[in-house]
Amino acid sequence: MAADPILIIATRPRLALARGQAGAIRSAAADYWALTKPEVNLLIAIATFAGFCVAVPGPLREFPWLRLVHTLLGTLLVASGTGTLNQYVERRFDAQMRRTARRPLAARRLKPSAGLWFGIALASLGSIYLATAVNLLASLLAIVTVLSYLFLYTPLKRKTPFCVLIGAFPGAMPPLIGWASATGTLSLEAWMLYATLFFWQFPHFMAIAWMYRDDYDRAGYFVLPHGQARIRFVVLQTMLPLVVLLPLVLLLGAMGRQSVLYCFATLLLNLGFLYYGAEFVLRRSSGAARRLLLASIIYLPLLFALMMLPIS
């Protein structure tokens, strides 16, 4: 039987409306997902996972897998909320930078109030979740991270290039949260893990700051000094932390009674990282900065994987 042409014509607008609504929902979901900064959260998850696992070496059958899941979930909720709130605070400045102009709040695809309440909800839920499902210490560390990142580091980005130093303190918190979640305490080894991530951030961010220096200048961010001081600053902030990292991670391995394999592999890994740092400060090109950035992203998970090798 032939379809009724009148019925077909009548249903077309409804189908188009349904498709449009579905598309709008998908677009909004993608924007809210982008607010959480998933690419940053991946590194946060790796660092938290490493801190947790290094804190509880032992047989897999005795490993607290459920607590690890709770830790990662709570930490990622807090991190997602922090990333969202950061974009809320910086939305006007993000709109002036090519790298960030397409972010949901900067591009005005979402209302600022939506981003604000979404971020508050995520950060609050994550902090409460850590306190109830893991322990109070992990939750307190997460809260300190949120507050120091939003109320110290974020405003200082427009006032002083030493914002990088201030931002490294909350930025290095994930392994501490992982360790605290696993043990309920913070040992010297935990603080050395913290120091490892603390120093790693400097060459990582110097590469980003150099690649997008014109963008940062255009938006009024003072992440690098002006004039000749800029070069001296970049060299110091890149090379000094790289030099400190090698003995630090070797000492961390010695404290954890790691194997000769750990020492050898860590030595090679740090020398490679140091090479790309030296290339960057000598060339000071976007290509060298990009290679250093890639090296930093590869370095961190490999280093943490080595730390989690079975103890000799």
Image (cartoon, rainbow, N blue to C red):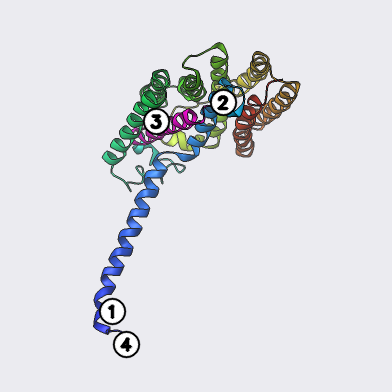
Residue 85 is a magenta residue:
yes
Which numbered disc covers residue 78?
Answer: 3
Front residue of 65 and 84: 65
Q: Quadrant of residue 200?
A: top right
Q: Amino acid at mark 4?
A: Ala
Could you tell me which quadrant the C terminus lies in?
top right
Q: Quadrant of residue 243?
A: top right
Q: Amino acid at mark 1?
A: Ile
Could you tell me which quadrant the N terminus lies in?
bottom left
The residue to which callout 4 is attached is 2
Front residue of 215 and 153: 153
The residue to which callout 1 is attached is 8
Between discs 1 and 3, the one toward the N terminus: 1
Residue 101 is a magenta residue:
no
Residue 230 in view (yes/no): no
Which region is colored magenta?
64-89
Between discs 4 and 2, the one toward the N terminus: 4
Between discs 3 and 2, the one toward the N terminus: 2
Horizontal relation, residue 90 to residue 38: left or right: left
